[in-house]
Image: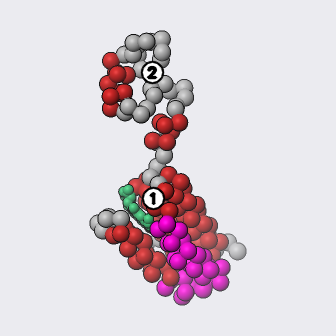
Amino acid sequence: MMHSIETRIAHRRFPCIHFVTVSETSSEPAKNPERLEVEELTALQPGLARFMPEIGARFWKCYYAAEAGNWPLARWQLSELRKLMRMCMVTRPKYIADLQEWIADDLEPIMQAIEARDVERFRRLYHESVDAANEFHRRWKKAFIVWKLPDAPPPDLDLTPRD
Ligand code: HEM
């Protein structure tokens, strides 16, 4: 069957993708696809450039929650951060070993300090883990990415302890 010119151009640019978004009976591209092929869904999955800003926001909230003595919130933020890193491992397996290393050597000890409600230990481990994260950025040739803890608490959460 003859495809529209748009479909043929798209096929040249993305040969691995089967364009089910184009109606088989019309030469017009469908306005909204009814379904996507698995290759298209795979190409849409977020990588670290998408997950890392979210990871940074969770880590920021974790710090100020602990400073405010809201330990359940600090635990929640860190556990959501761990889930995000596991999603990174699914979509970008080349980072699995390094992400697992940071989780084991940095995140888990911080989690223990949270469970112990030990703010001094929490602070020390937290700052060490930021250095470790930036070391991974250097390792992956992204030395220009240096994450730092924002000076102020997140404005969108009331950090008052509730327990
Ligand atoms: C809490 C710990 C971490 C924080 C707060 C953090 C934060 C960030 C931020 C803000 C970015 C820039 C995203 C952007 O705007 O494009 C980034 C990128 C990146 N991070 Fe992290 N990071 C952390 C841990 C790690 C670890 C453990 C690794 C190990 C693999 C890692 C690997 C990367 C890579 C490879 C990029 C570049 C992604 C890309 O552009 O493809 N990060 N990170």
User: Does 105 lie within the magenta span?
Assistant: yes
Where is the C terminus found, in terms of image quarters?
bottom right
Query: Badge 2: how crowded within 10 Å, few (<14), some, or many (20+)?
Result: many
Q: Does the magenta stretch include residue 73?
A: no
Amino acid beneath label 1: Lys
Between 148 and 161, the residue placed more toward the observer is: 148
In terms of sequence position, does the residue under pointer 1 or pointer 2 come before the other? Answer: 2
Image coordinates for residue 54, horizontal then vertical, percent: 48, 59
Q: Do the residues labelled 1 and 2 touch (CB within 8 Å)?
A: no
Q: Is mark 2 on a helix, strand or loop?
A: loop
The magenta span reads 97-124
Q: Which of 44 and 140 is in front in this view?
A: 140
Residue at the image position 48 percent from the left and 24 percent from the top = 20
Q: Which residue lies furthest to the bottom in this view?
A: 120
Q: Which amino acid does label 2 sit on?
A: Val
Residue under label 1 = 94
Q: Is residue 8 above or below residue 114?
A: above
